[in-house]
């Protein structure tokens, strides 16, 4: 049954501040496009309402629903493969009354499913349990990679593996798995699309094609560097306003923020992210059952990967993979799914004194 929500005030306050920063940055990056800012505000409001609703659901109910939510998400991915649409890929599902990206849902339902499965088995998991988990991860990850959307597919894999890591997996097993992945990398290279290979090549040498494939990384680094220590001021950045910086309201909005607010602003924003991540891990550590602990930890670590990958992408330290900056970049499905995940954390925190079994 639903219970009265009890928000974790430090976490809720940090998220509210992040949302305000996101809307201000979005308004500036869109060149004061009020309609776009309002549209993003409505999506974030929907996400906050969903967070409040999810926070009222006891973790025991979430645990019981996990297989069905996972199955529903996979079915939506199959529908995307058949009916999906998008620019250069099939990632979106248009139901006429709503258009969304089902792959974003897996960033929540995948760790829910893995936590549900591991919760019923001895920990740390053995090879048999790990094999089942790999199948559970591979099915949606494979469907997403075929869209193609390799960046999101890797995040889905990470969201499931975080639950495995937090289950107490022996370090020698972790090392063996990482070694196997590294050894398989040369083989995986041959299965990448050409544009995906080019992204890796541009990471290593973007100046080899400065007006073509390397344009994104070069302009992003210029924007970040030109912000200096204090930045140029809100809506005073030139890279986005003069259209040098591509995707400046989505993938590269961190570059816009860095140009406008400089190193000081970036450090403060990263400090806010660190606080949210730390609070999430504290909630995971204080959880009273295995399912809640694995799920809260996984959700928090996925949030961390979002920040790390987007930051690495805009500074040229990681390939451009289309990962948004959490609650800052323009987009609805990602923001709503992230806030729903924080609703799960709120629920786990509120029910931490009740042992769910």
Image (tube, rainbow, N blue to C red):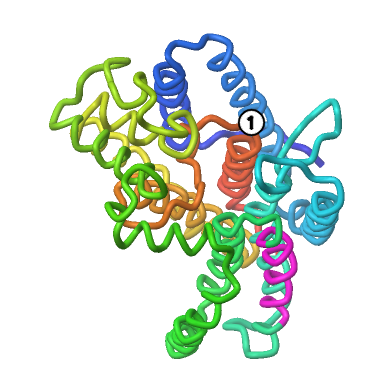
Q: Residue at x 23, y 17 (%)?
A: 233
Residue found at x 60% / y 34%:
6
299 on left or right of 219: right
Whether the magenta-drawn stretch holds residue 159 is answered as no
Res 44 seen here: yes
Picture residue at 63% right of the left edge, 19% below the top: 42
The residue positioned farthest toward the left in the image shown: 229
Where residue 326 appears, as percent x and y from the top left, is 48, 39
Q: Nearer the viewer, residue 108 or 191?
A: 191
Instruction: Determine crowd level at label 1: few under 14, some 14-19, many 20+ residues with C-alpha closer than 10 A.
Output: many
Say if 55 sits above or below 121 in the image: above
Secondary structure of residue under mark 1: helix
Magenta stretch containing residue 133, yes or no?
Answer: yes
The residue that appears at 36% across and 49% down in the rendered structure is: 214
- Residues 83 and 288: in front is 83
Q: Point out residue 303 in the picture as x, y percentages from the top left corner.
A: 49, 49
Residue 101 screen position, x and y as percent: 70, 42
Who is closer to the viewer here, 169 or 174? 174
Is residue 193 left or right of 325 when viewed as pictured? right
Residue 312 to residue 331: above or below: below
Magenta-colored segment: predominant secondary structure: helix
Q: Which residue is mark 1?
A: 47
Highlighted range, magenta = 132-145
């Amino acid at each position: 049954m639903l219970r009265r929500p009890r928000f974790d005030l430090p976490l809720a306050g940090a998220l509210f501040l992040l949302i305000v920063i996101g809307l201000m940055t979005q308004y500036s990056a869109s060149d004061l496009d009020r309609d776009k800012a309002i549209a993003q505000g409505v999506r974030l409001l929907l996400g906050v309402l969903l967070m409040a609703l999810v926070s009222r659901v006891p973790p025991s109910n979430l645990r019981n629903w996990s297989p069905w939510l996972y199955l529903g998400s996979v079915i939506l991915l199959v529908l995307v493969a058949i009916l999906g649409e998008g620019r250069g890929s099939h990632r979106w599902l248009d139901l006429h009354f709503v258009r969304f990206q089902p792959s974003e849902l897996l960033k929540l339902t995948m760790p829910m499913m893995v936590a549900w499965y591991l919760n019923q088995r001895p920990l740390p998991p053995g090879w048999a349990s790990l094999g089942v988990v790999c199948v559970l991860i591979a099915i949606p990850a494979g469907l997403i990679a075929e869209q193609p959307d390799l960046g999101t597919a890797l995040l889905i894999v990470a969201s499931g593996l975080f639950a495995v890591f937090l289950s107490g997996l022996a370090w020698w097993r972790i090392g063996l798995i990482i070694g196997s992945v590294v050894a398989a990398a040369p083989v995986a290279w041959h299965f990448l699309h050409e544009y995906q290979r080019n992204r890796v090549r541009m990471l290593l040498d973007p100046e080899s094609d400065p007006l073509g494939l390397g344009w994104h990384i070069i302009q992003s680094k210029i924007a970040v560097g030109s912000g200096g220590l204090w930045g140029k001021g809100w809506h005073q950045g030139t890279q986005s306003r003069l259209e040098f910086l591509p995707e400046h309201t989505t993938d590269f909005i961190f570059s816009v923020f860095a140009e406008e607010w400089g190193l000081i602003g970036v450090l403060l924003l990263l400090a806010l992210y660190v606080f949210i991540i730390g609070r999430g891990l504290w909630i995971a550590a204080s959880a009273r059952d295995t399912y809640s602990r694995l799920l809260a930890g996984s959700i928090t670590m996925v949030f961390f990967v979002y920040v790390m990958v987007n930051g690495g992408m805009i500074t040229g330290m990681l390939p451009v993979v289309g990962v948004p900056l959490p609650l800052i970049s323009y987009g609805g499905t990602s923001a709503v799914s992230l806030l729903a995940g924080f609703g799960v954390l709120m629920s786990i925190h509120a029910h931490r004194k009740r042992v769910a079994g």
